[in-house]
């Protein structure tokens, strides 16, 4: 399985019910999880089939996976990321999602590489990017007047002065 075809669609946050279902928090706006049949779970990318999917509230779903037939098996999946092969879903092929931005370089206006995006946090009202610059990591808000994603370069372009002013 090629990692570049995989899209992180959510994270299993806890079990749901007593029959082995899990609650997954969706990372995809406007995509109903009922379209997904085959997924990959965790760092080992364990292949699983979704056997049941029910929407909950606030971008969450209750899903049953063939690899978790019991609540004990489902509990072992807690805090695991869930991925799909975007080639299997036309709805996902030409869209860019936050999880696609991980490991993209960050360049200043002159094209000098400053670091790499290693993580993000979506707080609803705003997204905060974590950028690793050598051995140090910084967090900055993902707002256009500070940092923009350039799809042609497949890199972030950052206003270096504003970066130095807002980074934490």
Image (tube, rainbow, N blue to C red):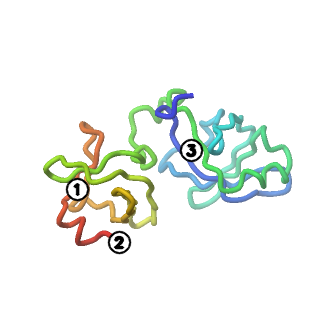
Q: Residue at x 55, y 45 (%)?
A: 9
Q: Name the residue under label 1.
A: 158
Q: In which quarter of the image is residue 159?
A: bottom left
Q: Residue 76, relative to residue 95: is it above or below?
A: below
Q: Name the residue under label 2.
A: 168
**Badge 3 density bin: few <14, some 14–19, many ≥20, Cα 10 Å:** some
Q: Where is residue 44 in the image (x, y as percent from the top left)?
A: 65, 40
| Mark 1 → mark 3, Cα distance in angstroms | 33 Å
Which is more toward the observer, 93 or 166? 166
Q: Which residue is drawn at 78% across and 39% down?
A: 67
| Mark 1 → mark 2, Cα distance in angstroms | 15 Å
Dot 2: element? loop
Q: Which residue is drawn at 44% across and 58% down?
A: 120
Q: Which quadrant of the figure contains the N terminus? A: top right
**Badge 2 density bin: few <14, some 14–19, many ≥20, Cα 10 Å:** few
| Mark 3 → mark 2, Cα distance in angstroms | 35 Å
Q: Name the residue under label 3.
A: 32
**Mark 1–mark 2 CB contact (< 8 Å):** no
Q: In which quarter of the image is residue 23?
A: bottom right
Q: Is residue 90 left or right of residue 20?
A: left
> Tag 2 or tag 1, which sits nearer the N-term?
1
**Mark 1–mark 3 CB contact (< 8 Å):** no
């Amino acid at each position: 399985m090629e990692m570049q075809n995989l899209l992180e669609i959510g994270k299993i946050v806890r079990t749901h019910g007593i029959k082995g279902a899990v609650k997954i928090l969706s990372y995809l706006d406007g995509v109903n999880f009922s379209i997904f049949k085959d997924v990959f779970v965790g760092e080992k990318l364990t292949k699983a089939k979704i056997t049941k999917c029910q929407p909950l509230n606030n971008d969450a779903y209750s899903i049953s996976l063939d690899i978790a037939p019991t609540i004990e098996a489902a509990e072992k999946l807690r805090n695991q990321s869930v991925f799909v092969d975007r080639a299997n879903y036309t709805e996902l092929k030409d869209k860019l999602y936050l999880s696609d931005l991980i490991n993209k370089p960050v360049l200043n206006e002159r094209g000098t590489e400053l670091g790499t995006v290693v993580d993000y946090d979506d707080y609803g009202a705003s997204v905060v990017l974590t950028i690793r610059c050598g051995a140090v990591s910084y967090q900055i808000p993902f707002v256009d007047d500070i940092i923009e994603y350039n799809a042609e370069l497949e890199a972030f372009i950052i206003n270096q002065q504003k970066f130095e002013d807002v980074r934490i």
